[in-house]
Image (spheres, rainbow, N blue to C red):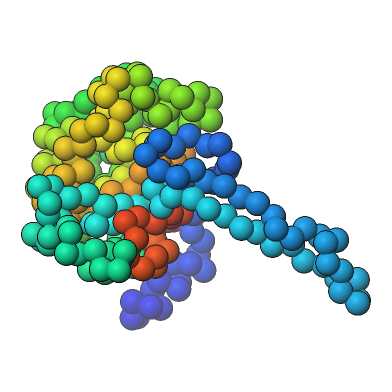
């Protein structure tokens, strides 16, 4: 049996798909650093009716590429004027586009995914505002779940903070309160496992200190600039946690936005039914 046949047999036998992406809605919580999502209907049913009575509606959207569930391209962050691989950030911008490290260069992902349910491992529903997820927290979560992290994996870190997305958007953004997340040491630890991408249920993946907003993002530097590891933010991870799904097939395909610094995404976790 070849790999394609085995894959098709698995599909026929039944698979469960868990949606890890947020629904895009006008007014949803987002980083104030990026243009908000907006949706309008320039044509509604009845605005134009065909001779046979048929009618069609269509849409127009505008949004930043780092709004809602999205992936950061390697062009998103620079350090001391350099992008990943030592590429000069100024000369990398060609005609208003990042040709070498833009979102169009992110290959579709079909990889082993791992959920690190840190909140559950620490015995809480949700981590405290501004809590830094330490290396010992990540290691304790791995031990509790009985899993390993391998090279090329996609590692998703759950803080429980996603519960605030709908119920308290201002708290979710954490401008005053701060947001829990991985710190610089945790990012170095993840990079040491040679992961392909990381993600979280928070607005910026990493820990935001109370009152500091997005002023300093050292984990972004470690992951994007120093190690070329993609970051997925504002994910929905509660269903995986609720059902104890810690290992799965992770599927993600960014929009091939030429030269962009990020892309909206709808990541999926696929497991046996």
Residue 162 position by quadrant:
top left
Q: Up-down: is 194 above or below 101? A: above
- Residue placed most toward the observer, 5 or 54: 54
Tell me if I can see residue 109 in this picture: no
- Residue placed most toward the observer, 127 or 173: 173
Tell me if I can see residue 217 in this picture: yes
Q: Please state if 268 lies on the left or on the right of 182 as rendered.
A: right
Q: Picture coordinates of residue 214 (x, y %)? A: 28, 33
Numbered-mark total: 0
Q: Please state if 45 lies on the left or on the right of 269 as rendered.
A: right
- Residue placed most toward the observer, 201 or 33: 33
Q: Picture coordinates of residue 66 (x, y %)? A: 39, 48
| Residue ID at (39%, 22%) | 125
Q: Please state if 49 lies on the left or on the right of 144 as rendered.
A: right
| Residue ID at (21%, 26%) | 132
Q: Up-down: is 93 above or below 180? A: below
| Residue ID at (35%, 19%) | 176
Q: Up-down: is 242 above or below 96? A: above
The residue furthest right is 52
| Residue ID at (31%, 65%) | 97
Quadrant (top left/top right/bottom left/bottom right) for the N terminus: bottom left
Q: Please state if 1 lies on the left or on the right of 265 as rendered.
A: left
Q: Up-down: is 191 above or below 181? A: below
Q: Picture coordinates of residue 197 (x, y %)? A: 25, 53
Residue 196 position by quadrant:
bottom left
């Amino acid at each position: 049996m070849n790999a394609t046949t085995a894959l098709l047999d698995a599909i026929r036998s039944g698979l469960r798909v868990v949606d890890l992406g947020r629904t895009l809605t006008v007014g949803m919580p987002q980083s104030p650093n990026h243009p908000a999502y907006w949706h309008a209907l320039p044509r509604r049913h009845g605005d134009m009716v065909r001779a046979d009575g048929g009618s069609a509606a269509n849409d127009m959207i505008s949004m930043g590429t780092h709004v809602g569930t999205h992936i950061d391209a390697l062009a998103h962050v620079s350090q001391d004027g350099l992008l990943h691989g030592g590429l000069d950030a100024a000369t990398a911008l060609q005609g208003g586009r990042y040709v070498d490290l833009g979102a169009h260069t992110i290959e579709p992902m079909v990889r082993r995914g791992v959920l690190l349910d840190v909140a559950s491992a620490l015995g809480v529903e949700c981590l405290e505002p501004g809590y830094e997820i330490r290396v010992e927290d990540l290691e304790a979560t791995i031990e509790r779940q009985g899993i390993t992290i391998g090279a090329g994996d996609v590692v998703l870190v759950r803080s429980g903070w996603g519960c605030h997305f709908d119920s308290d958007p201002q708290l979710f953004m954490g401008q005053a309160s701060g947001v829990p997340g991985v710190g610089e040491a945790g990012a170095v630890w993840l990079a040491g496992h040679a992961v392909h991408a990381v993600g979280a249920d928070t607005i910026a993946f990493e820990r935001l200190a109370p009152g500091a907003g997005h002023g300093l993002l050292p984990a972004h530097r470690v992951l994007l600039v120093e190690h070329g590891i993609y970051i997925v933010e504002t994910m929905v991870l509660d269903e995986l946690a609720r059902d104890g799904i810690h290992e799965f097939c992770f599927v993600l395909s960014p929009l091939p936005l030429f030269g962009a610094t990020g892309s909206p995404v709808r990541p999926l976790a696929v497991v046996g039914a």
